[in-house]
Image (cartoon, helix red, strand yellow):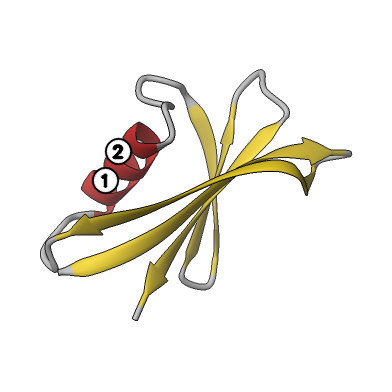
Amino acid sequence: MQNFLVEYTDTFGGQANYCWCERETVTLSDCATDRQIVLACKEAVGLSGVKCDREECGETIILRPRGSCTVMFIDPQY
């Protein structure tokens, strides 16, 4: 099993602001696909069905919901 730390926060000037932040831990099997990881993490913070722009920075997946001044970070935990 693998854990992922999900941080969902507001932005200011396009950068993470952390005026408020939702943090969740998502546990998935080791054989979960990249798509399954993103879908489970989006569901954990209430973003199911919301279209997002995706970036990758090392192992971190960054999702920016379209039309919203927010950002979500998905970090694998070892």
Tell me residue 1's x, y (percent): 14, 69
Give the residue at x 43% y 35%.
Answer: 45
Identify the residue at the far right of this view.
13
Q: Nearer the viewer, residue 60 or 22?
A: 22
Q: Is residue 57 left or right of residue 13?
A: left
Q: Whole-percent x and y of residue 40? A: 27, 42
Callout in the foreground (1, 2)? 2
Question: Which residue bears the numbered disc 2?
Answer: 39
Question: Contact (CB < 8 A) between labels 1 and 2?
Answer: yes
Left or right placement of residue 23 versus residue 44 in this view: right
- Vertical order, 1 against 52 (above or below): below
Residue receiving disc 1: 35
Question: Viewed as shown, does residue 57 lie left or right of 25?
Answer: right
> What residue is rendered at 29% in x and 65% in y?
3
Judging from the image, what secondary structure is the residue with disc 1 in? helix
The quarter of the picture where residue 2 lies is bottom left
Vertical side of 15 occupied by 31: above or below: below
Q: In the rendering, which numbered label is found on residue 1?
A: none
